[in-house]
Amino acid sequence: MNRIFYPMKVHAVKLEYKRLELEHMPHGHFTTYKGRKHVVITYDPARPKISNKSKRLLLTTTQRGKAYSEQINTYLMKKSEYDALLSSWHAMYNFEPPKVRFPIRQYSDPHGMNNDFFSRQTDRCGPYVPKNPTVSDHGDLKSKNELFGADLLKMMDIPFKYETEVYLPAIGETINPDYLVNFYEIDRCSYLEILGMNDKVDYSLRTATKITGFSRETYRPGKEVIYIHIYDRQNFDRDYFVSQVLSAFNDMIPDEALDWEPTGMVI
């Protein structure tokens, strides 16, 4: 899997979120003038006098030039991401994307699982250390399936933390879900559990206890907790993983958060 196809509401939210990010950062590009590299600033929300007609040209080696260079590099990266999202939108739909009413408010958030909650959580809390960990760019993981999941979350632009901890009073246990994923554009995060090895009795019992604990503590499937059932340990289903995660993301975007303008239709 080399490309992610977002559901419509997720696609619209990601587009508008990046568009607003771009609005609040300096715009520009790089050029070489008289054999020396310069950064060209064409827009800066903090300096209204700078515009396409009144550009700012700075050597990248000066103190201010270095500062702007970092900002313009970030701008160009995010602009490329935005352009790719917009291009794929136009390839799929014959109408313009909607505006999105930020911040997006949830119908219910019983555990306060927002961006602040995500930032406060400590990862890698799990007590079990495998003898032969799966080494990856994400750090040491317990299995290849966890690595496949981590790679796909990164591809979907969904930040995550590995094995945070949550206490479930209903079963009297502190557990370490595989991931805590952050749908930062909608100020929401969810636990994500990869469930496999159902042929092993002890594992199956622990899984059932864990699901019961989540349910009794009002962690709703597809909202506060996302379950990925792996029925074949040797063949990780990437399409299924992506669809489950993005379906949850899409379902947490209320329809009224999108503002469809009739003038956005393409003739």
Image (cartoon, rainbow, N blue to C red):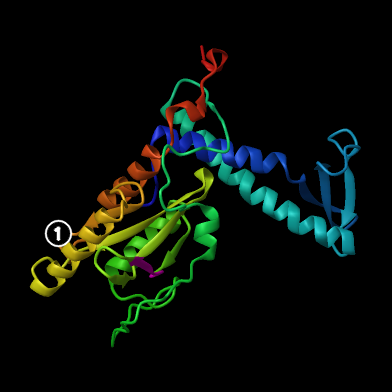
The spot of residue 145 in percent (x, y) is: 27, 66
Measured as percent of width and height from the top left, residue 30 is found at 78, 51
Q: Which quadrant of the view contains residue 205?
A: bottom left
Q: Is residue 62 left or right of residue 91?
A: right
Seen from the viewer's position, the closer of residues 159 and 54 is 159
Q: Which residue is mark 1?
A: 231
Which residue lies at the image location 65% right of the left edge and 38% below the top edge?
Answer: 20
The residue carrying pointer 1 sits among few (fewer than 14), some (14 to 19) or many (20 or more) residues within 10 Å by Cα, namely some
Query: What residue appears at the point 31 percent right and 51 percent down from the top-left corner?
Result: 218
Snapshot quadrant of residue 106:
top left
**Residue 134 position in % (x across, y down):** 33, 77
Which residue is more in the foreground, 197 or 154? 197
Q: Is residue 165 magenta?
A: yes
Q: Position of residue 40 (x, y in %)?
A: 83, 48
Using the rendered image of the protein, determine whether residue 177 is visible from the camera's viewpoint.
no
| Residue 115 in view (yes/no) | yes
Task: Say if 137 sits above or below 217 in the image.
Answer: below
Q: Name above or below for residue 260 compared with residue 43.
A: above
State the predominant SS element of the stretch in magenta.
loop
Secondary structure found at label 1: loop
Task: Tell me which amino acid carries mark 1.
Answer: Tyr
- Residue at 45%, 53% in the rendered image: 113
For this orientation, the residue located farthest to the bottom is 131
Q: Is residue 243 left or right of residue 8?
A: left
Stretch of the chain drawn in magenta:
163-167
